[in-house]
Structure formats: C-alpha cells, structure tokens
Image: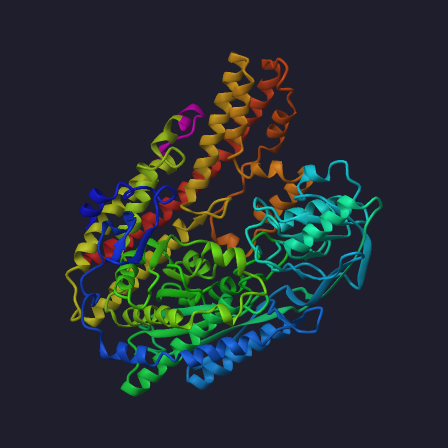
Amino acid sequence: MYYILTALYPEFGRTRLERGELELSRSKHGVVLIVASLFLAFTVPIGTAMGKERPALLESVIENIDMDYAWQICYDLENMGTATDIYGESLGFRGAGSASSLEASLYVRDEMNDIGLSEVSLDEIPVDAWEFRGAWVDIPGIGKMQAASFGGSPGTDGEITAEIVNVGDGWKDDFEGLDVEGKIVLANWHKESWPNYVAMEAYNNGAVAVVLTTYDSLYGMQDGALQCHDGLYRPCYPPILSIPGSDGLAIIELLDNSESPVQATLWSDIVTTSRDEGGFGWNVVGYLPGKNWGTLDDEFVIIGDHTDAWFFGGTDNNAGVAGVLVLADAFKKTCDEFGEQPERTIIFVTHEAEEYGIVNTYYDWCWGAYYEITNHHPEWVGKTVAAMILDCVGFGGHRLAIEVNEELFSFTHKVAGQHMSDLPYGVEFHPISVWADHWTYEASGISSILFSDWTDDYCLNYYHSQYDTIDIIDFDYLRGVFVLAADMTHQFITLPIAPLNFGTVASDLYATMMMGNDKFSVPALYSIYDSYGFDPDANMGRTVSALEEFRVNAGILMSILEGFDDTVDPGIAREVNRLMMSVEVALGQSLVAMGVWEEHYYPYQQSSIDVKYLERGIEKLSASIIAGNEHKISDAMSSLSWVGVTWYYDYISEESYWDNYDLSYGTGMVSWGTQTHLLPAVDIWNEYDQLNQLPLNEDITAEDIDPIISGLRDVMVTQALPNLEQSFETMWTGLEEANLLIEEIIAL
C-alpha cells in the first residue's frame, strides 16, 4: 500500500505542516482516497480482527445504541441554563462552576448510576467559576440590543452609562489620538486577534467597558448571532460584551452621522467566584469493569467529552454527552445480555471547564480534562490503550473529522474505512490539536482520538452562538458516528495486543526532522551551531541518533507483532501491552508539544523556526549595510516577524505585550500549557521596535544597524539556541527511554 500510494500521490511523504489530510469521501464510484500521508508507512499488526465478520458482541452493542435516548439527553441538557434574554426567555449557558453546569454534572452522574456503571463519582475541580445570567446594550436611537459576554469577564456591577467610541479593530494603532478614558469602546472582532488583546488595550487606555461586534470575524456571521468564547481574561480588564455584527454596524452608522457624543448604557449580570474564594466544578466518572477490574493487570479505554456549554450547546457539546451515555448504556446492556465483562475496563468521563475554567492564564480551556488526568486519575496513564473524545459532533453534511495521534492512525483509518455506509459524508483525518480535551490526555502519554464536525458553515454560523441547538443535530448521521465509536471501543477492549503502531511516529518524525522544509530541517541547523560555537552533537546529534535507533526498533517491533494473533498467551500479551503503553507515555510526554501559534509540534520545531528566522533576519540586516538597500531591511523585518511572538507588534502595545508574555510563558503558564514543552518565547521586541523606528526613506548607516544586529546575535546566544538545545534534550530523553522499552519487548 505504501509504495502504491507514493506512486499515485506526490503529496505522500510530506512533513506534517506541508502535507494534506488523509480524507475518505463518498462518490458515485464508492470510497475515494483523496490525499495520503506518511501515517500509512506501516500497516496495523495482524491480529486486529480487521476484515473479519462483525462479532456478535459488537452487533449487540450497535443494536443497543438508543437514539431516542440520545435525543432525550440533548433535549434535557438544552433546557439547563442560567441566562435569559431581554424578553425573559432562556438563553442557555453552562459556564464552568455555574449552577447549570453543576446541574448537568449531577444529571450525568444520575444517568450513569441508572445505566448501572460502577463507582460513579463526582470529581471536584477548582475553577474560577463564571455564571452568565444576561446582558444588554442600550443606545438612544437604536434601542436595547441583546448581548452576551466572554468567559472570565466580570459583570458590569449595575448599569454603566458612558460615551461610546468606535475603535475599529481595537489594535494599538486604533487607539492613537483617541481619548477613551472613562468611555465605552466599540471594536470589531478581527480575524487576526483574540478579544483579550482588545480588552488589554482598552484597559491600558482607561476604558470602562468593551462592546465587541462581529462584522468581520471567524464566527458569528449568521444574522443576529451572538458570540461567547473563552476570554483569556485577567480580572482587572474591563467588562466585555458581545453583540451581533448587524447591531455593531448600526452603532457605527449612528456614530458616523452624529454631531455630538453618543451615550450607551451597558448591563451584564455575571457572578464570578475565584478558585481562592472556593469556586469549583465537577467532572463525572463511571466504570464498566473489565475482567481484571481492581487488579494490577487491568487496562483501560476512556470515552469522554465535556458538559459545559455556551448558550444551548446543541452540538457543542450536548451531542457529545449523549455519545458518552448512549455508548455506556449500549455496552452495559450488551455485557449484561452476554453475562460477560469486557476484557478491559471502559471508563466513561465528562469534563467541566473545557471551554473556559481559569483566569490569569493564556491556557484557560481544557482545564477540567487537564485536572482529571494530572490530579484525580494519574494512574490511568500507562494503563490506557486509548482515550476517545466526542466534541462538536452531529452537524451533518460534511466529512467527520477525526484527530488522532500517529500511533493509532493506521488502526483508526482501517476501522473508519469499514463504516462508510454509516458515515455518508465521509471521513477526514488530522493530527491532534490543542482545541479539545483529548490534547491533555495525549500530552500525558495516552493515545488519543477526537471525533468532531468542523466545517466553515458550522464555525461561521452556529459555533458558540445561540443557534447551536438540538435543531441542527442530524441524529441519523450522529448514530453513524456512535457506531464507529462503538466499533473502535470494541476493538480496543478485545484486541489482545493494543493496536499502537510506533512505526508511524518514527516515519513522521524522521520526515519532519531530516527531510522536512527549511523551517524544520535539522541538517540546516549545523552551520548555525558552528557559527555561534554550540556543540551540535551534545543534544541535536544525540536526538538524531536516538531517532535512527527508534526507527529500527519500531520496525522490528512491528514485525514481531505481526506474528501475534488472537491466541497469543495472555501473560505475554499483558507484558507487551504494559511495555507498549510505557513507550506511549515516554513518547507522549516528550514529543507532544505546541508552538506559539498553537500548532501541534515536535518540541524542537518552534525553536527551529526561531533560530532560522532570527539568523535569516541578521543576515539580511548585514546585507542592508553593504547594499544600503531599504528593501533588505524590509525583508529582515519580514523574517524577524516569525521569531517568538513578534507578530504581536502590529496589534498590541509594549505594555500589553509583556502582560500577554507573562500569561503565556511566565507565572500565568498553568494548566495544560505546562504539558506542551513550550519554552519562553524568544524576545526581540526592542530590536524589532528599533527597526520600525528607522527612517527607511533616508540613508541608513552601519551605525544605525550594527547595534540592532548585535542585540539580535545576543538573543541568539542567550535565548534561541539554548531553547533549541533544551528542546532536543527533551526529545532524546524520551526517545532513548522508548528504545529501552521496545528492546525489552523484542527480548521477550
């Protein structure tokens, strides 16, 4: 298959950021493979029951998938909410730590008990609780407009009446020349920045509140759509309210045509309770015990999602909660009918605070899942075959998006390929991302999968708006998603050997490091190391050597596993699984990382970008002295904009930059941010600012440029290259541990 795909598709073999997605779609000719990737360099081991007749137990599970029950769950959850609109009607909302979110958790707990799961528990998590109850904006000549808010934002503490001023996109330059002290600012939510940046600038300029509208956004483009998201908020920021784009444009028109200041009155009812004040929420856990339940030999499969929601939460995430409970019900009924326990224990879990959970940090989402796996149940790590998360499912008309790590890709792809009749819109595959609860499990060392339905239509018109209701859920399609999840779960609990394929991650990592584009190519780093006097062998070379050994070991292991079948000795299978899951922990905790753009990276990739673009900028600045060419300076600035978080320069002031820097890399780097091997961003703000101050229309001399070059070279030596060295050390540490563990398996 690998060689056929290589010949047919030139895209095959690209690194993760260059390559396309592997997609399966329906056509009149059947299933069509559109784009392939290196994930298929190794096939899934023999013994995975692929291609066999569907087992009776799985058939029973599928028959027991109760979509009437799914509808009822979605309906019940939709009617839980703390907010009302300006007409007194429910607006939904289950913010972290709110009364309605607690109601949802208690509901899930009771359902799990009714299903008959074992040891059902409420796991308390500390949260900066946020309970939204209602909001509006009132402007004479327009009237009272419905508003919402953003996670973490304080309420208005009564009504706020002040002059309202349009600040465009709310970036730093938009505030130039405007007096907003004691005033309300109206800003468009531009696609290039998050609302907290607007709030930071408003705070720095003395505004008393922010009204955010969405006439040019990634979200909320349906007529009348309100928006609510995590806010990345500090409690000191002013209250922020959101209104539909059409209302925002009406206010702008009024401001443009008014000869006198326009007054606005805002009101939002938001109750916040910090963690220090006793704010808390609840995760819910229930078990379907396996045959080795309660012993050291037990292994787990996790099925989860989140209960908190903005507005009514139809697909995000009532349908996901329904999936957890419906699958729990189907597996429990089937086990009772067969009088058997599953080979492995199935853990069903719902998390609170996925959308938002804490303030004073950049990483304010996925807090509940992070807390569950790092504080409540770290014992799941090293014992879990896979964690499967259902989030934003049920919006039909588009291919099901499956995010999956490399180790489970070949398995997941093959299983999904057998369910095209259940998934009429097809399937597409992506690497894992940071945007849902599966990320925290993956970074802990548990192979993870996410099912979701991301489409442009959904994001633009329904996502995180009052239009995400039960009415947009395609329950026939949703059943197909549940059937696929049931089949994967069944195989996860019955396969003697966990279907982890380390050959895929070995191939992907090798392609990225050794054959990737210039940003990530390791060979291209050697000359930079030499020019700055860094030893290329100490960490970078050691990582390459460990990777080469890992590729060989992974290949040998895959060959051995292909010799196993369903009759493998249970004792040997348990030892192989123990070691394989330990390998997964070593890889997950050392290779799963994030870049400053929230990309799923290997740890060295962000540092590689910083080093290479910093060096490129230095080279172009040096050339500008020789050529006296302002074009070279412009090129240098373009390169330097890739370094660290320098792109913030165009949007926020230096004060806001350092505030955000602390949120992202300093004392505010908490929750899953600490799992991502994201090193402090390389800081070249001063040098970049100096370049921006140069009069490019005049002669620029070496005297102007040399101090900047000197500063950048100092940053290279004190920040960029040390970061890269630390990244490589993280990688070789994990790879060498993985090699030792695989060699133990080989020696069995």
Q: In the rendered image, is residue 435 in sight?
A: no
Front-most of residues 110 and 415: 415
Is 662 on the left-hand or right-hand side of 493?
Answer: right
> Is residue 540 shown in magenta?
no
Image spot of residue 126 (x, y percent): 60, 67
Residue depicted at 57% across the width and 48% down the height: 664
Vertical side of 564 occupied by 194: above or below: above
**Which residue, as the protein is rendered here, is positioned at the far right?**
260
State the extent of the magenta-drawn residues as a range.
528-537
- In this view, the residue in front, 162 or 285, is 162
The picture places residue 482, in percent across and down from the top left corner, at 37, 71
Residue 7 location (% of width, % of height): 20, 42
Residue 143 shows in this picture: yes
Report which quarter residue 47 is drawn in. Answer: bottom left
Residue at 82% from the left image edge and 56% from the top image edge: 161
Q: Which of 25 and 710 is in front in this view?
A: 25
Let me know if residue 535 is in the magenta part. Answer: yes
- Residue at figure coordinates x 39%, y 43% from the top left: 17
Quadrant (top left/top right/bottom left/bottom right) for the C terminus: bottom left
Corner quadrant of residue 652 = top right
